[in-house]
Amino acid sequence: MFGIINFEAFAITALFLILMPGTDTFYILGKSMSEGKKAGILSALGIGTGSFLHTLFAALGLSVILAESAFAFSVVKYVGAIYLVYLGIQSLLEKRKPNNKELSSPMKDRSKNVFLSGVLTNVLNPKIALFYLAFLPQFIDPNYSNQVISFLVLGSTFTFFGTLYCLFLGIFAAKMTAKFQGDSSVGFYLNKFAGALFVILGIKVAFSE
C-alpha cells in the first residue's frame, strides 16, 4: 500500500533509531530538567514539528540540495550550531531560573519560544535531512508512481512515534527533577547545566562531518 515495502522491518528499525540518543534527546532533557514539564512537552512537540518538516523536504526533493551541495550542508550545519550555542549562552547568562509559572503566564512569550527553539534545533540539523534521504527510500517501491505519498506516510509514521517517545522523555525527566525545581538554588544550577549542555551540543554539531 502507498508503494511501501517491508513495513514491519521499517517499524522495527525506526524503533531502534528513535531510542538512540542524539541532539534532540539532550535538548529535550536539558529543557525538561531546567524548566519543567511544560517546557519538556513544548520542546518535544517542537522537535516533532521539525521532524515532520524534514519529511516534507525529503518528499519534495528539497533535502537533495543538502546532499549534493557541500556549501548548503555547511551553511545549515553552522547556523544550527550557532543557534544551539546561543541558547546555551542565554541560559548561562540568565540570573534566575524560569519556572513553570512563567511558562504558563499569558503575558510571556516563553512557551512559544520554547516550541520554536525545538523546531529550529531539529530543522537546522542537516544530518537529519540526510538521514531521511538515506533511510526512507529503502522501504519504497522504486516502481511506484507517486513516491511523494510513500515518503509522507513513512516520514509521518517515524515522526509520530518519535514524538511520542520525546514526550515520554520530557515528562519523565521533568518528574525526576521536579522536587529540585522548587529549590531556587538547585533550579539555578540545573539551568546552568542545561546551558552548558547546549553549548557542547552546538560545538559537536559544528565539528560533525
Image: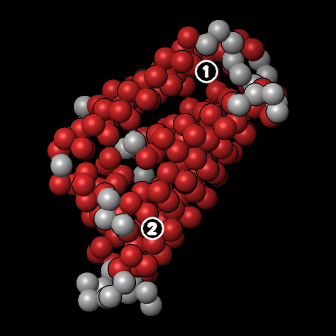
Q: Position of residue 60 (x, y in %)?
A: 36, 66
**Whether residue 14 can be seen here:** yes
Residue at 37% across, 68% down? 59
**Whether residue 172 can be seen here:** no
Q: Position of residue 10 (x, y in %)?
A: 40, 74
Q: Position of residue 134 (x, y in %)?
A: 27, 64
Residue at 24% across, 54% down? 65
Q: Which residue is mark 2?
A: 155
Question: What crowding class fits label 2: few (fewer than 14 Cα within 10 Å), some (14-19), or many (20 or more)?
Answer: many
Q: Which residue is mark 1?
A: 191
**SS state under label 1:** helix
Whether pointer 1 and pointer 2 mark residues with C-beta atoms closer than 8 Å, the reply is: no
**SS state under label 2:** helix
Residue at 37% across, 44% down? 125
Q: Position of residue 16 (x, y in %)?
A: 43, 62
Q: Is residue 121 above or below residue 190?
A: below
Q: Is residue 67 above or below residue 3?
A: above
| Amino acid on which the number 1 mark rests in the picture | Asn
Q: Nearer the viewer, mark 1 or mark 2?
A: 2
Would you say 76 lies left or right of 184 here?
left
Tell me the quarter of the image containing the C terminus.
Answer: top left
Q: Is residue 112 above or below residue 140?
A: above
Q: Which quadrant of the structure image shows residue 176?
A: top right
Q: Is residue 203 above or below residue 12?
A: above
Tell me the quarter of the image containing the N terminus.
Answer: bottom left
Q: Nearer the viewer, residue 147 or 26?
A: 147
| Amino acid on which the number 2 mark rests in the picture | Gly
Question: What crowding class fits label 1: few (fewer than 14 Cα within 10 Å), some (14-19), or many (20 or more)?
Answer: many
Residue at 45% across, 67% down? 155
Q: Nearer the viewer, residue 80 or 41?
A: 80
Would you say 209 lies left or right of 131 here?
left
